[in-house]
Image (cartoon, helix red, strand yellow):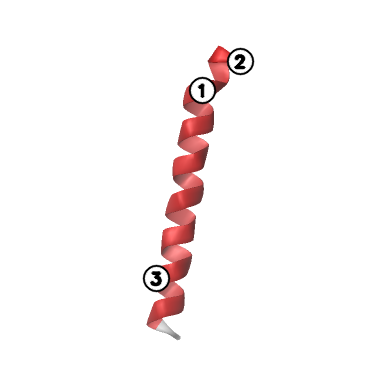
Amino acid sequence: MDPALILRQFLSVNQLKRDNDVNIFYAPRR
């Protein structure tokens, strides 16, 4: 396993989670 690849996947998952949190937070205003 490539540590850099694991780190990149981990960061991308965190970015998706943050986007979902933002969408959930702003959804009621729409």
In which quadrant of the rendered image does the N terminus lie? Answer: bottom left
**Which residue: 48% across, 59% down?**
12
Is 16 situated above or below 7?
Answer: above
To which quarter of the image does residue 27 belong?
Answer: top right
Q: Amino acid at mark 3?
A: Leu
Q: CA distance from mark 2 to mark 3?
A: 35 Å
Q: Name the amino acid type tagged 1.
A: Tyr
Lower sequence index among marks 2 and 3: 3
Q: Nearer the viewer, mark 2 or mark 3?
A: 2
On the image, numbered disc 3 is attached to which residue?
7
Mark 2 closeness class: few <14, some 14–19, many ≥20 residues within 10 Å: few
- For the point 39% across and 70% down, which residue is it? 7
Q: Quadrant of the image for the C terminus?
A: top right
The answer to whether marks 3 and 1 mark residues whose Cβ atoms lie closer than 8 Å is: no
- 18 over 23 or under it: above or below: below
Q: Which mark is residue 13?
A: none
Secondary structure, mark 1, is: helix
Q: Which residue is at 55% across, 13% downward? A: 29
In contact (CB < 8 Å): disc 1 and disc 2: yes
Q: CA distance from mark 1 to mark 2?
A: 7 Å
Q: Dot 1 corresponds to which residue?
A: 26
Who's the residue at 51% across and 49% down the image?
16
Q: Which mark is residue 30?
A: 2
What amino acid is found at the position of numbered circle 2 in the picture?
Answer: Arg
Badge 3: residue crowd in 10 Å (few <14, some 14–19, many ≥20):
few
- Under circle 2, the secondary element is loop
**What whole-number distance in Å separates the C-alpha atoms at marks 3 and 1?**
29 Å
Q: Secondary structure at mark 3?
A: helix
Residue 3, x across and y down, in percent? 38, 81
Residue 24 horizontal/vertical position (percent): 51, 28
Q: Earlier in the sequence, mark 3 or mark 1?
A: 3
**Mark 2 and 3 residues: CB-CB less than 8 Å, in contact?**
no
